Image (tube, rainbow, N blue to C red):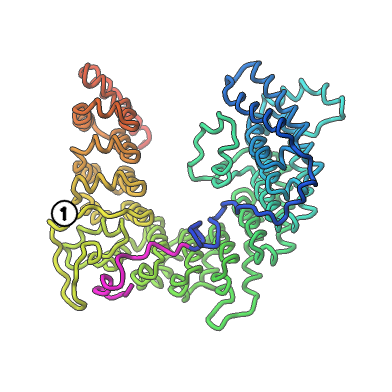
Amino acid sequence: MGLGPRSLHKAGRRFPAGDKRGRGAKGSGRPPPGRQRPPDRSSEPAQDAHPHLSPEALGYFRQALSALKEAPETGEERELMVHNVLKEVEAEALALATNRTGSEIMQELLGFSPLKPLCRVWATLRSNFRFVACHRCGVHVLQSALLQLPRLLGSPAEKAEEDVEEEEDGKDGPLETLEELVLGLASEVCDDFLFYCGDTHGSFVVRTLLQVLGGTLLESERTRHRGSQSPEAQRAPTREGKPSDFEVPETFLNRLQDLSSCFLKDIAVFITDKISSFCLQVALQILHRKLPQFCAQLCNAVIGYLSSRNSSADGSPLLLFLRDQTSSRLLEQVLLVLEPPRLQSLFEDHFQGQLQTLAAHPIANFPLQRLLDAVTTAELLSPVFEELSPALEAVLAQGHPGVVIALVGACRRVGAHQARVLQLLLEAFHCAEPPSRQVACVPLFATLTAYEVYYRLAEEEGAVPAEHQVEMGTARALGEVTVLGSLLLQHLLHFSSPGIVLRSLGALTGPQLLTLAQNPAGSHVLDAVLTSPSVTRKQRRRVLKTLKGQYVALACSRHGSRVLDAIWSGATLGARKEIAAELGERNQELIRDPFGHHVARNVALTTFLKRREAWEQQQGAVAKRRRALNSILED
């Protein structure tokens, strides 16, 4: 796509959506950060190297799992059933763990397990630890066992169980505690650290072990293992987007320090080997939260090693590794965990003067995005902005909009250069001049499309840009909203002065705003309108009034119903009356709709239609409580 104001229409239909390398896209060659690689068969032992699981045994465990799922969640009968099933699991542990179907069943059964049975199963598998850890099925059982620690570690109920079963344990010798089992597993990993980190399957165990020792489960790990949890755990929300912390004994953190030292001994391997590198990336995330001084040591070791390689003709040797599939992913994580002073010096020593080159590179643009994500000071943002800002349109045309969104996000976070970056965006999308075009910026930003392309104008190069025609804007249905376009608008709505974006939103027709609200990505733009502290109550009402007449369509949409619930939560009593009255006209349609009936219940629509006074008293009391709560929060 050309960079001139008239060349966009000839060269392509829209700004490219973004280079798909490294984000789990088809053909990217690199899995997303934190996501597990699909295991292969390279390290699987011969089939006769482990016990065989008979079809009868497999059938028993499948039926047992089904029965546990259907049984009451509490009670003696359930406890006895769990105890009996896990006794059988202990007897067949190795055969189950190394059978594909058996492994999946065993992972789910461990989600039901109390402390003692889990320890017994763990102890059984530990005698064959290397074999199980490097087996394509067994590794996931070990991961599931480790991921039970937040539920079981230090639980008072489990302590009581331990006392009850103490006499029984004496029959076969003392059973190791859960803490001892984890520390023992960590010792075995530490003794052969390079092997486990470099093995396709064994590295899974290392990465999960690092999280457990640090008392932090990363979001990708919790999401991935949601299916192997008990029904109670499955109902708990896990998509809050932040790591989940839990208490661990001091011995765990000590062992985490030992493992971090193992990285330092062979830092070159962990930088250059694709599989081992994932272990170091997880370690950096955990250490950053729990042992920041050790995280700094690892970061310095990575930067020191890469900086000492053969220098390139065009600058720092580090730039060579920013273009490499494996080391660039590691550097992305390093950039995210560096302290601000160290990040500043890294920029000055290695990045400065190279940002536009990095932004244009299909791989190096991703570490650059992480650098922008890590910016928290005006001292660093200013030189970065001055270097990158002249190339915003070129970066968009090259298909790397993530760089632009990350720069806008940094301006939002630091609170600097906001007016300038907005002006540059208007120019890049060809809606800065004449000023009448600015009212069209929301559809352009949301779809990442230049003005001429979006409105299908055939303007000659060098011609004076035409004025925006209101009729043309209202007649055109809203285009397909992209995820990055939505993120861009969310950042802009949180700027200190989002007036231009709000005026553009207010110019959308009801059907256009409805399309935005019903879109999975676009609905979050309206979330930003509702939550941004920069948007006044008057501005918010001006945007949302366009949705009048669209409430039923909103209520009957998966994403629109969520937006309507958010609007309802912040609405005044008068606005609630208007919404309820419009919904009440099509009450039966709402009740029959899978999303609409939830909205009808939330609005108390039946009460509104049959007992209006009671409804008004109820809503008035809710509004009064909300005002009191807001007053307390403001104080």
- Check the image and report above or below for 530 versus 3: above
Does residue 112 appear to the left or right of 380 in the view shown?
right
Q: Is residue 264 above or below residue 54?
A: below
In front here: 45 or 455? 45
Q: x%, y% of residue 584?
A: 21, 26
Where is the N terminus found, in terms of image quarters? Answer: bottom left
Residue under label 1, please give it: 475
392 sits to left or right of 339: left
Looking at numbered disc 1 in the image, what kind of residue is underneath it? Ala
> Quadrant location of the C terminus?
top left
Question: What's the residue at 60%, 19% (across, down)?
Answer: 74
Q: Return the residue nearer the eye: 473 or 480.
A: 480
Q: Kindly state the secondary structure of the residue where label 1 is placed.
A: helix
> Within the image, what quadrant is residue 322 found in?
bottom right
Magenta includes 329? Answer: no
Q: Magenta residues: mostly which secondary structure?
A: loop
Q: Give me the residue at 21% from left, 41% from top.
A: 547
* Image quadrant assignment for residue 326: bottom right
Residue 499 position, x and y percent, is 24, 54
Q: Is residue 496 left or right of residue 229?
A: left
Query: Would residue 118 be visible to someone looking at this image?
Result: yes
Residue 370: x and y in percent read 49, 61
Where in the figure is residue 541, as x and y percent of width and height? 21, 42
| Numbered range of the magenta stretch | 1-20
